Amino acid sequence: MNAAPLDIVTSPWRRLVISKASDVDRPAYTLCALERLQDSLRRRDLYVAPSERWGDPRAKLLQGARWEAERNQICRSLNLPLDADQTLARLRAQLDGAYRRTLDHLPENEAVSLDRNKRDRPLTLSHLDSVDEPDSLIELRELVVERLPRVDLPEILLEIHLRTGFADVFTHMG
């Protein structure tokens, strides 16, 4: 187990996985690897095939001749140019502008502190104060809640079972 690849071990896990004698703790390493696996699945860096939830999100994109046939209509409906380089250049400029504005305002931002002596975590963000919800949002939320039907959970489960038959796979304990 000491030949296990340690590049997956993050700094919070390091003290649990690697002992002072530089031995690898197998259960801790396993949990660390599972956490990294879950993070990779969540970020879509890793895919499971076939799977609806954890599958490759690019698999459902239009490709080839079908994309070429639909491209004009899709770009027009999204108000995007046909040339992807134009869109990428615009987005690149927006991102660069946002980075520059952030950098320009960093010295006077009291919520951010930068300590270059801390090698692990030089950037610290303080907690933000909560912002009061505007009256219009509170009123809108109340209007939406008024319009939603009052339904009990058993009714929802029965309706979903009628559509999908999911409850058929359960067996009675008795």
Image (tube, rainbow, N blue to C red):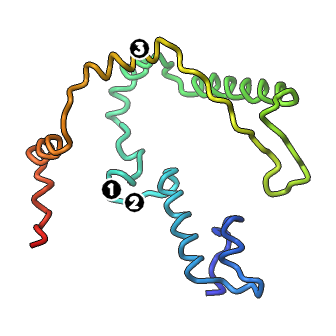
Dividing the picture into quadrants, the one containing residue 92 is top right
Number of the label disc, if any, that sits on residue 153:
none
Nearer to us in this view, 126 or 31: 126
- CA gap, disc 2 and disc 3: 43 Å
Is there a contact, CB below 8 Å, between mark 2 and mark 1?
yes
Along the viewing direction, whichever of 49 and 150 lies nearer the viewer: 150
Q: Quick check: 113 above or below 149?
A: below
Tell me the quarter of the picture where residue 169 sits: bottom left
| Residue found 41% across the figure and 16% down from its top | 76
Q: CA distance from mark 3 to mark 1?
A: 41 Å
Q: Residue furthest top?
A: 136
Indicate which label's residue lies in the foreground, 2 or 3. 3
Foreground tag (3 vs 1): 3
* Dot 2 amino acid type: Val
Residue type, label 1: Ser
Q: Residue at x 38, y 39 (%)?
A: 61
> Marks 2 and 3: CB-CB under 8 Å?
no
Left or right: 88, with 145 as reference point: right
- From this view, report whether residue 126 is shown above or below residue 3: above
Quadrant containing the N terminus in the rendered view: bottom right
Q: Secondary structure at mark 2?
A: loop
Q: Position of residue 142 (x, y in %)?
A: 36, 18
The amino acid at mark 3 is Glu
Nearer the N terminus, badge 3 or badge 1? 1
Question: Residue 80, position in %: x, y?
Answer: 49, 19
Q: Quadrant of residue 29?
A: bottom right
Q: Residues within 10 Å of mark 1 (few under 14, many from 20)?
A: few
Q: Is residue 112 left or right of residue 137?
A: right
Residue that carries the numbered disc 3 in the rendered image: 139
**Residue matched to label 2:** 48
Residue carrying label 1: 51
